[in-house]
């Protein structure tokens, strides 16, 4: 009998047990990086943590060519002297428990220019996400997502987006990048 015959891969997203040879869970989550466990060995259950707030103490300039941080309560940008406007605060909650605040432009992909920890995670665990997959934008007109012509598509609430057409998001929108990476957008309104 093989040493790994009694082992399974427990999905970090839904908790379902899959055979040790499975590369994906039935929910679509990649299992290649999941440690093998014995069947019935449930991980320690802890109370779910509340999702972190998107509140940021600084105010970023909403203009894409500036984006500089300003003091809370400032009405005009210290750097470009344009109005700061009323950009909603928003963040995206990733399935591994991290949260990214959506700035004037937040790139999603596997290349430099993307937040280093996000790019590294995508390169390691979500290789079907394109190098420059999508961009999330926060502006006075709201929060948008735009597919950058990715190979495997960007989806909002399971509807595939046309390439290079920004789509406005609402609080609680489920954004999926390619087949495996699903995240939730949280928008705070004053």
Image (spheres, helix red, strand yellow):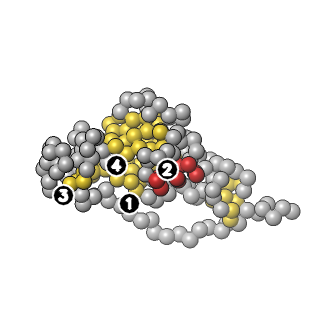
Residue on which the image places disc 2: 119
**CB under 8 Å between callouts 4 and 2?**
no
In the rendered structure, which disc, 4 or 3, sits on the residue that comes first in sequence? 3
| Secondary-structure class at tag 2 | helix
Question: CA–CA distance between discs 4 and 1?
Answer: 15 Å
Q: Position of residue 158 (x, y in %)?
A: 47, 37
In the rendered structure, which disc, 2 or 3, sits on the residue that comes first in sequence? 3
Residue on which the image places disc 3: 71
Asked whether 150 or 20 is in front, the reply is: 150
Q: Residues within 10 Å of mark 1 (few under 14, many from 20)?
A: few
Question: CA–CA distance between discs 2 and 3?
Answer: 29 Å
In the rendered structure, which disc, 4 or 2, sits on the residue that comes first in sequence? 4
Question: CA–CA distance between discs 4 and 2?
Answer: 15 Å
| Secondary-structure class at tag 3 | loop
- For the question of whether residue 84 can be seen, the reply is no
Q: Residues within 10 Å of mark 4 (few under 14, many from 20)?
A: many
Residue on which the image places disc 4: 102
Which residue is drawn at the image coordinates 24% and 38% (left, top)?
A: 141
Question: CA–CA distance between discs 3 and 1?
Answer: 25 Å
Q: Single out the mark in the foreground, 3 or 1.
A: 3
Q: Position of residue 87 (x, y in %)?
A: 23, 46
Residue on which the image places disc 1: 51
């Amino acid at each position: 009998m093989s040493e790994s015959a009694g082992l399974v891969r427990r999905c970090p997203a839904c908790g379902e047990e899959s055979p040790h040879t499975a590369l994906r869970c039935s929910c679509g989550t990649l299992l290649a990086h999941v440690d093998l466990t014995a069947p019935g060995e449930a991980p320690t259950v802890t109370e779910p943590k509340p999702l972190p707030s998107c509140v940021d103490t600084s105010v970023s300039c909403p203009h894409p060519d500036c984006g500089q941080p300003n003091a809370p309560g400032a009405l005009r940008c210290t750097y470009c002297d344009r109005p700061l406007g009323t950009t909603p605060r928003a963040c995206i909650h990733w399935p591994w428990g991290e949260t990214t605040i959506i700035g004037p432009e937040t790139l999603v992909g596997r290349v430099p220019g993307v937040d280093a920890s996000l790019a590294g995670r995508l390169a390691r665990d979500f290789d079907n996400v394109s190098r420059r997959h999508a961009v999330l934008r926060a502006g006075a007109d709201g929060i948008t997502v735009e597919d950058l012509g990715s190979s495997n598509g960007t989806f909002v609430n399971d509807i595939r987006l046309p390439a290079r057409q920004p789509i406005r998001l609402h609080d609680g929108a489920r954004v999926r990048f390619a087949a495996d990476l699903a995240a939730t957008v949280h928008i705070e309104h004053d």
